[in-house]
Amino acid sequence: IGARYEPPFPYIDGAHVVVPGDFVTTDDGTGLVHLAPAFGQDDYLAGQEHGLDAPNPVDLAGRFTDDVPLVSGVFFKDADPTLTEDLRVRERLFRAASYTHTYPHCWRDGSPLIYYAMPSWYIRTTEVRERMLALNRDIGWHPEHVRDGRFGKWLEGNVDWAISRRRYWGTPLPFWRCDGCDHAEAVGSFAKLAERARGPLGEDFDPHRPFVDDVVLDCQSCGGTMRRVPEVVDVWFDSGAMPFAQQHHPFEAGRLEGRFPADFICEALDQTRGWFYSLLAESTLLFDETSFKNVVCLGLILDSEGQKMSKSKGNVIEPWTVLDRQGADAFRWYLLTAQSPWDSFRFSLEAVDEAKRRFLLTLWNTYSFLVTYAALDDGWEPGGEDPPVSERPAIDQWALARLDETVAEVTTRLADYDATTAGRAIDAFIDQLSNWYVRTSRRRFWGSDRRGGDDLVADRRSAFATLHECLATVAHLTAPFCPFVAEEIYGNLVAAHDPDAPPSVHLADWPMPQDRRDDVLERGMEAAIETVALGRAARAEAKIKVRQPLGEAVVATTATSAEAMGALIDLIATELNVRTVTFVTDPGELVEVGIKPNFRTLGPRFGSDMPKAAQAIAALPATETARALDAGERVPVSIDGKDHDVGPDDLLREVRPAEGYAVAQASGIAVGLVTEIDSPLRLEGLAREIIHAVQNARRAADLKVEQRIRLHLDGSGEIREAIDAHRAGIAQEVLATEISVGHGAPFAGDHREELEVESEPLAIRLEAVS
C-alpha cells in the first residue's frame, strides 16, 4: 500500500499509487488491478475515498479524445488492437487473450456500450425514504407480494435520483447558470421565464430544444449572462408528474380535487423501478401522499418458447393479427381470464381460439337459442307478466340463485381488482346455463302444443323469463371484459324492448344480487349435476346408448344429500333416461367388495406357498376384512393348517359393480343403473333413435325449426314395432302432422334417405307442410 508505479500508458496524469480496496482479491491474478474511477462504481468510490480524480479520455460518442493521441477519434472498442500492439512494441505486454463474458449492448441496434461517470442533477429522495416506505404499506398491491418484495426492497435501498440526461430530445431542465459567477437558478413557469429573459419570448415561443437554449437571463448576483444548462430531464420524471401535471398543477390547483390520488394504476412488473417509483417519489415530495391507492402489476407476455416478446427479437405477434383473426372480445377475454394478469404467460393464437370457443361461442349459442325460440313464440315478450320467481319450477329458481351468486362474486372480485377470478365465475355460470339449464329445459321452450293449457303457458313463460334475465344480466357482467358482444346482447334483449333503458350496456347501472339464494336447492342441484354425470359415466362404461331408456337408477348418498335432491327427482330421471330413481344410503347395494393378495409384499413372505395363500385370502369374508383394513388392523388367515396374519399393506381391495348394475362413484355419491332392458324399454329406445334420425333428416332438408312436416317411415321387425308403439310420440317430437308407415309412400317428399338403426333398415321420406 502506498507504492508508486510507472503506468503502462503515459497519456493520463494521475497519482499512480497503490491503494487498498475490498473488492479485489488475491484468489485470482496478482491481487492488483488498475483503477479507472470514471468507468466503474467500485473504482469511483475507491477514488473518492483516497482523493483520486476521475479522468475520462472518452467522449459522448464513445470515441477517444485527443488526450490519447495514439487512438484519438477511434471508437473505444475498435482501439483495442492498436493499444495492445503498442504495449507489445514497448515490451509492456505480459499476455493478450480474448475471453467470453457478459457485456452491455444497446437494446435497439446491438452496439456495445460504455458506462462512465459524469456530473448530474439529483433530487434528494433519500430524505423521504421512510415516508415512501410508510405510504407503500397502505397501497393495495396486486399481487400483494410486490409491495414488500420487489418494490419494497427497491424503496429500502433508495438512493438520490439522478434526473438529468445528456440527450437532445426530452423536457429541457429548467436551470440557468451564470457564465461568470456560476450562480444557478431554477425557473418555475413560462411567466417567470418571460419576466427574467433579456428579450421577449414571442407569441410562437417553443419551450423545447433548441429554441429554449437561445433564451438568456441576466444574473441577479453578478449581472452576467445566464444560459440554460445543456441537460434534459429523465423521462421518468415526466411520467411521475403525470397525475398533477395533466391538471396543470400548481397553476390550476383546484382541478386536482376528486382526481388525485387515483383509485388504481396498471402497468407491467418492470415498472416497479420506473413509473411506479417515480409516481410515488414525486407525490411524496410534493404532497406527502401517494398518487395511487391501488396498483395492478402485470406480468409479461411471452412467446410460445417462453421468451419475452420484443420487436428487436422479432418474436412479437402484432395485435392487429389477433384482432383480425379472433376479434377484440376474444383477445380481451383471453388476456384477462387465461391466468392472473400479474403472472407472466406464454401467448399463442391457438390459446385465444380456445378461449373464444369455450366462452364466447357458448355464450353466443345460448343467446341465439333464446332469440330463435322467443321469435317463434307469439305469447311472450320481455318485460311481460311473467310468473313470480317463487312460483317457477325448481330449475328456474336454481338458475336465478346461481345468477345472484355470480353477480355477487364478480362484483367482489372486480372491486378487488381480480379480473381473472371474476371472469372465471362468469365462465362457470355460462357453462352451467348452457350445458345444464338450457339442455334440461329445452322442451319447455318448444312443445308440440304451442298454445297448450294454462300450466304449459306459464311454464314456458317462466323458462323464457328466466333465461332472458340470466343473459341480460350476464351482458352487464361481461361488458368490462367483452364490450362488443355484451353491447349486442344487451341491445337486442333489453334496449330494443324497454324505452326507459339506457341505450348502451356501458351506460347502464351495475347489477346487484336479488336475494334469491337457496342453500338447499343449490346443494341439491349440485348433487343432481354430479349424479347425472356419474350415471352417464356408468352408462358409457356399460356401453349402453344415451337414448336407450333404462328401468331404474339407484343413487347411494347421504340422507342430507338425498333430501336436497328430492324435489329434483323427475329432472334426474329425465337426464339419466330412466323410469325411476331410488335413493339409498348404503353403496353396498350397488358394489361388491373383493379382497385379493398383494403379491409384491406377500410373494417374498410365502414363496412357493403363495398359491395356497392366495386361495386362503380369496376365501376371507370381504366386507368384514375391508372394515378391518380401514381400521388398520391385521387379519388372521390359515394356510395349510398354519396360522398367519396379514395387514393393510398385504391386501388389495377390488370394488366391482353388483350383478345387474352399471356403477360409477366419486366423492361420496355412487350411481347404479339397472342394465336389464325389457321389450318395452327396447322399443322406446328404438323410437328415440328413429326420432334422432328424422331430426337429422330435417336438418339435411334445411327445414326451419318450426316447420311442420308430413312423414313416411318404412321398416320391419323391431323398427316397425317401435313405430307402431310410439307413433304419437314420434309425431310430436319431429313436428309431423301425419305419419304413414309401409312400403309405399303416399307422397313424393322433399327429402328421402335410407339408413340403419340398430342394424335394422329404416327408410325416411318427408315433405314440408305449407
Image (tube, rainbow, N blue to C red):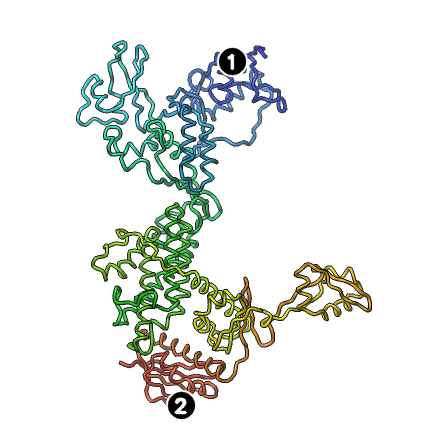
What residue is shown at x 58% (from left), y 69% (from top)? 587
| Dot label at residue 195 | none
Going from the N terminus, do you reach mark 2 or mark 1 first?
A: 1
Q: Position of residue 766 (x, y in %)?
A: 34, 82
Q: Where's the C terminus, which quadrant?
A: bottom left
Q: Which residue is mark 2?
A: 743
Residue 666 seen in render = yes
**Is the N terminus in the top left, top right, bottom left or bottom right quadrant?**
top right
- Is 431 located above or below residue 450 in the figure? above
Crowd band around label 1 with a 10 angstrom C-alpha radius: few (<14), some (14–19), many (20+) = few
Q: Residue at x 42, y 66 (%)?
A: 436
Considering every residue shown, the one lying at the far right of the view is 641
Badge 2 amino acid? His
Q: Image quarter for residue 205? A: top left
Q: Which residue is mark 1?
A: 50
Dot 1 amino acid type: His
SS at mark 1?
loop
Q: Check disc 2: other Cα within 10 Å, few if <14, some if 14-19, many if 20+.
A: few
The reply to whether residue 756 is visible in this rendering is: no
The one nearer the camera, 414 or 174, is 414
Q: Nearer the viewer, residue 234 or 275?
A: 275
